[in-house]
Image: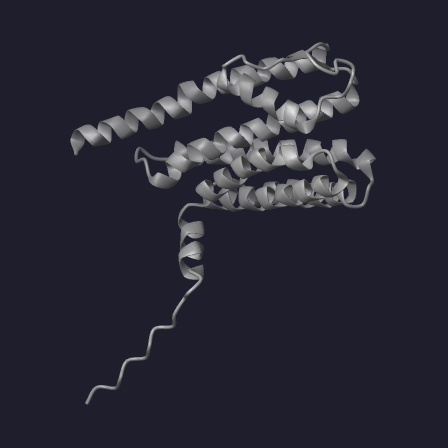
Amino acid sequence: MAAPSKPIPEDPLGFGRWTASLRSHPSGWLLGVQLLTVLVNPLMENTAAGRAVFGAFGIVVLALALWVVNRSHAVNWIAWLLAVPSVALSLAANIGGQTQLLPMAHMLESALYFYAAGALTAYMLADNRVSMDELLAAGATFTLLAWAFAFAFSVCQSWYPGSFTAAVNTESPRTWMELLFLSFSLLSGVGLSDIVPVTPPARALTMLAMFAGVMYIAIVVSRLIALTTLRLRRD
């Protein structure tokens, strides 16, 4: 007589599905958290508590960036070498009130996001098969580049005051949301930003962002579209 089978434990909150989804599509989670940050940041950036919450969001994004790097063939210790001090400096600046550390934190975060974007790009170009996670990685890589250049613009603004002007509050430093908006505008090539770089370092970074956006679309996005179209024709 066969022994009665053990009852399968219930998972009413769906933690198993969430965990499986995180393992299968970390790029999608990274993309979702970054887009959520774009939506909630305008509600938080004008208060100290809001900036602290935004710093916590940044740590989550950093953790997910480390996760996606771990799925690629990138050298993990480089990512950790950038992430650990950037988290420490970000916490000290946003929660501890040591705002003088913010430029260094942003410089390290910019380097980490550039590294993660490169790792995801290598992951997408590693084979001739297009998976759902690679399609999500295409969006996540774009947002990583946007964050990386926004942090670079922030560092530039700290080192060279007055690097960016705008249609409103022309003499004031640009907020994080304004710099992120500029980054998205440059990378996408839409040219809708009302923020203008006025110092040579700022203009150099701006040109690099334009170049990165054009090359990303020309090399990565066009390749994914071509491979997807080829697969559909074969099917």
| Residue displayed at 38% across by 35% down | 135
Residue 66 lies, with reference to residue 148, above or below; the image says: below
Q: Where is residue 224 in the image (x, y as percent from the top left)?
A: 34, 28
Q: Quadrant of the N terminus?
A: bottom left
Q: Check the image and name the residue furthest to the front.
A: 43
Locate residue 76 relative to residue 218 in the image: left or right: right
| Residue displayed at 77% across by 15% down | 162
Front-most of residues 230 and 46: 46
Colour scheme: one colour
Residue 5 lies, with reference to residue 189, above or below; the image says: below
Q: In which quarter of the image is the C terminus?
A: top left
Front-most of residues 230 and 169: 169
Locate residue 3 relative to residue 41 in the image: left or right: left
| Residue displayed at 68% across by 44% down | 53
Q: In which quarter of the image is residue 105?
A: top right
Q: Position of residue 110 (x, y in %)?
A: 64, 31
Q: In which quarter of the image is residue 220?
A: top left
Look at the image and tell me whether residue 197 can be seen: yes
Q: Where is residue 11 in the image (x, y as percent from the top left)?
A: 41, 66
Q: Where is residue 96 in the image (x, y as percent from the top left)?
A: 80, 45
| Residue displayed at 63% across by 41% down | 58
Q: Quadrant of residue 109?
A: top right
Locate residue 233 relative to residue 193 in the image: left or right: left
